[in-house]
Image (tube, helix red, strand yellow):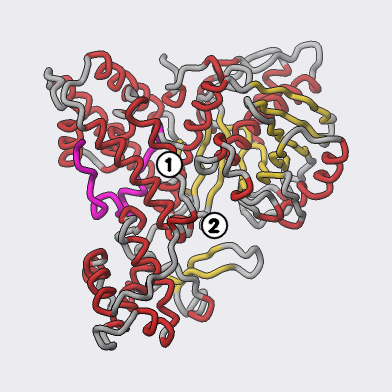
Amino acid sequence: MNALRKPDDVMRLDRLGSLHGSRLSFLRILLRRIQAERWSFERTAFEIDADCTGHAVYTAYTPDRAYSLVVFAHQLDPEHRTDRVIANAWDSTFTLFDGVPTDGDIDRLRCNVPQQEAGRLSPSELTMSRANKSVRLWDVLASTLAAGEQPATELIDETGYLMRTTAVYGSGKFGACDREMILDRPELQPAFQAEMLTVFMVRQFARDWLEHDAYLQAPDSAVRLDDALATRLGIGNSTGLGMAPFLINHPVLIDHWIRAREKAIARVQSILEVTDADRALVMHLLNRQWADFRSWRSSDEKQSAAIIALLRDLDVLTDWFKSRSSNTALWAEAMRFAATSLCLEAQETLASVMLEPYDELVDSLAIEMAVDESELKPVNGALTVTDSIRQIDRQYYWLDNIHWKHAEATALLWYVSEEKLEPRLGLRNQDAFEVYEQPLAPARDIMAYRQALQSWPSETPLAEFLMCEPEHRLAAMRVQWIATNQYGEIRDNTIDVALRPIDLLRCKLSFFGATRFDPRSDRWLRITLYRHAPYLDQVVQTNQFWIYGPTQ
């Protein structure tokens, strides 16, 4: 197998902020399982009145158990409509229930789910979420369908979703089921599968609610949304700084995600003779990807320019393939060409798309993306000060490239807002003070840890050092984890004045399977999930390459 790309190259914020989804994205892992195990879905309740209030239930039946999305619809005044996580009212709220809920369960959930953070769930609930309509598109589509007509494709593509979520909570938050309680279930072992299932069924509800709205407007003339148009609609999501610390706080997990993707890339690059069929498939999917990228819209100047550069460089890549008749070591040669000639977004697009023909090489890596708790080992206090310094120098040699004496290097500060207990990023001593700082600057903290170690006798046990200077315990544990999880550390300064937090967001969202990245600032962005995906009644029969959009 080819060597994996070096962490020094991969774990830079500009590259992480250029990642695209792949066969290892969590929503694609989920849909492959649904197809392989032939899950079935049923809408068991839909009691939503003309005043937009009521509830609905959608149940997914796996070979061993059932999961139900419980939906509550609400009337939302226009002045309360916002993408901000601090909102306290939404068009709809949801929970993923473990099993099939009784009437008593529905009544209990009705008292809690609409309140979101102010409510409380039970271990029977796996996730909690909420979403707002994209009102302009919703109103136009509802009135068009009510008149018995179909909307224009361009109108649907301009927005790309009917509803957009502002949060999907899980893993024990607000009383929901702890992840440890469901890890024996194969369908939930890969990361974020309960969350991905929630969003998948929310998308079905959004379509059903739209068509119900059209029917209520004109029962005699209303029609359903054409299937080909409906699949062009995903679920939108607004994501801000609340997600950013995840990549910093979970280094072992992030190592597993990135390492699995890098293993897949290396395996495919190792193919010596690529078949004509596999080459043709990748070229076909690159063309479909190009067409889909062309439909992306962004109000952010930098992202708009990035899309233009991406389209241009994919044309360059296509020309390169046309000029190369040999299939020998094709993918390795293509990656080498991309690394020297194409922008980062085009490089990572190629890296993802060339995995597509090789399910037998790639898909089994999904199981390696989860972390066993035994991997999160406590600090080994038997190491000496010298051992610890050597470990830092071996793994964190890049710290010396950061100009720590410059004020810009430590200009930013991560803290938690008092109002919503959500992560925030501000200017040090202006927006927040160091007493409130969160430990989200590992580069700075490990540099301080190394400096502190250097003042101690070389053979001192690390345990003795940490007893006297416990403020370095987190850095010490991180250094020891990264020794065997080198893709878990970002090789950049996360408190530098030039930091663009959306690079952190983009990386995580690419593993979800997000598309249509649309930054609204350097601190939050909108994306779309499940655009071009089948709906619940079509998922088992749909081609696995749906994510690249229609063939025409």
What label sits on residue 242 in the rendered view? 2
Rendered location of residue 457, percent (x, y): 26, 88
Q: Tell me the element at label 2.
A: loop
* Label ID, residue 510: 1
Q: Nearer the viewer, residue 422 or 133?
A: 422
Q: Which residue is at 49% across, 66% downward?
A: 425
Q: Amino acid at mark 2?
A: Gly
How many angstroms separate mark 2 from mark 1 (CA)?
Answer: 16 Å
Horizontal relation, residue 71 to residue 274: left or right:
right
Q: Main secondary structure of the magenta part?
A: loop
At 83% from the left edge and 29% from the top edge, which residue is drawn? 47
- Which stretch is magenta? 1-23
* Circle number at residue 201: none
Residue 13 in magenta? Answer: yes
Above/below status of 175 relative to 103: below
Q: Is residue 462 visible?
A: yes
The reply, left or right, for residue 108 in relation to residue 526 is right
- Residue 83 place in picture, x, y as percent: 61, 49
Of the residues under marks 2 and 1, which one precedes in the sequence? 2
The disc labelled 1 sits on which kind of residue? Ser
Residue 316 visible in the snapshot: no
Magenta includes 446? no
